[in-house]
Image (spheres, helix red, strand yellow):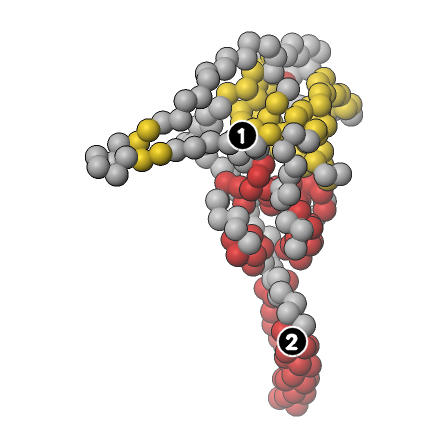
Amino acid sequence: MKLDITESKNISFEVSIQGIDHTLLEGALRLKINEIEYGFPIKINSNSIEAEIPVLSEIVKNIENGSDCEAKLEIYGEGFYLKPWNETLTLQSPVKVKAVIKEDDQLIQPSEPKIQITSKPIIKKEVNKTDVIVEKKKPKTKKEIIEEKILEQFKLCKTKEEKQKFINKLKRNQKVSESKIQTNKKNNKIQIESINDVIEFMSNNGMKNRLTQTRMLENAKLISNSEDPEDLYEVIKKMLNK
């Protein structure tokens, strides 16, 4: 099966689920590209499974045209793991040309054959752009956690002397931290304190699509098994070969 890496894809599987309520099941569609496995969430219905693959060329850099990748569908829940489908896909980046007539600014559409795939899974070229992405509540940043702990320790100081000693200690620690920050800046090290810093890093490296950024963050969470912004940054940095 061929997969166009320049377009989003919506893949639908026809399934028959017996012996368990489908609402208790979870799973993912996984693609192994350049020795790195990427996971995409799926929607499990009573008689079908749907998976959306974003534009791969925006997520994975340096995909060789015509290269193969391993694809598999995973389903798990209630203490079991199933792999009902797996296949080798051929990744392609087709050449597309659009021309515009200057006189009347009419768009000449490229001549492309219409292909209808009746075998399973069914690949649809159009993705519903009105899909709502539900984001989890953002965890507290390291800076917020540290500030809360400092406030709790300060409240434990009963006398003015204890409070003054605590403040002096904070000032010394702050000077040390500022010195480390200056050292990191000299070494061109990026400071990652929140998810917004990770999103800014992706935008600065050409990944400005919000949907693509969200998918990339979900993949980084699966790979790193963490929601810490620094862990997610390290994974995404490797994906982008930075």
Query: As drawn, is 110 to the left or to the right of 55?
Result: left
x then y, percent, for residue 152: 63, 70
**What residue sits 41% from the left and 22% below the top?**
111
Query: As drawn, is 55 to the left or to the right of 241?
Result: left
Q: Secondary structure at mark 1?
A: loop
Q: Residue 55 versus residue 168: which sits nearer the camera?
A: 55
Q: How many marks?
A: 2
- Locate residue 160: give its quadrant: bottom right
Q: As shown in the figure, which amino acid type bears the numbered disc 2?
A: Lys
**Label 2 to label 1, Cα distance in Å?**
43 Å
Q: Residue 65 versus residue 1: which sits nearer the camera?
A: 65
x then y, percent, for residue 31: 68, 31
x then y, percent, for residue 219: 64, 41
Q: Secondary structure at mark 2?
A: helix
x then y, percent, for residue 2: 61, 23
Residue 75 visible from this viewpoint: no
Rendered view: 113 above or below 51: above
Q: Residue 179 versus residue 241: which sits nearer the camera?
A: 241
**What residue sits 64% from the left and 19% below the top?**
1
Residue under numbered circle 1: 94
Residue under numbered circle 2: 186
Q: Residues within 10 Å of mark 1 (few under 14, many from 20)?
A: few
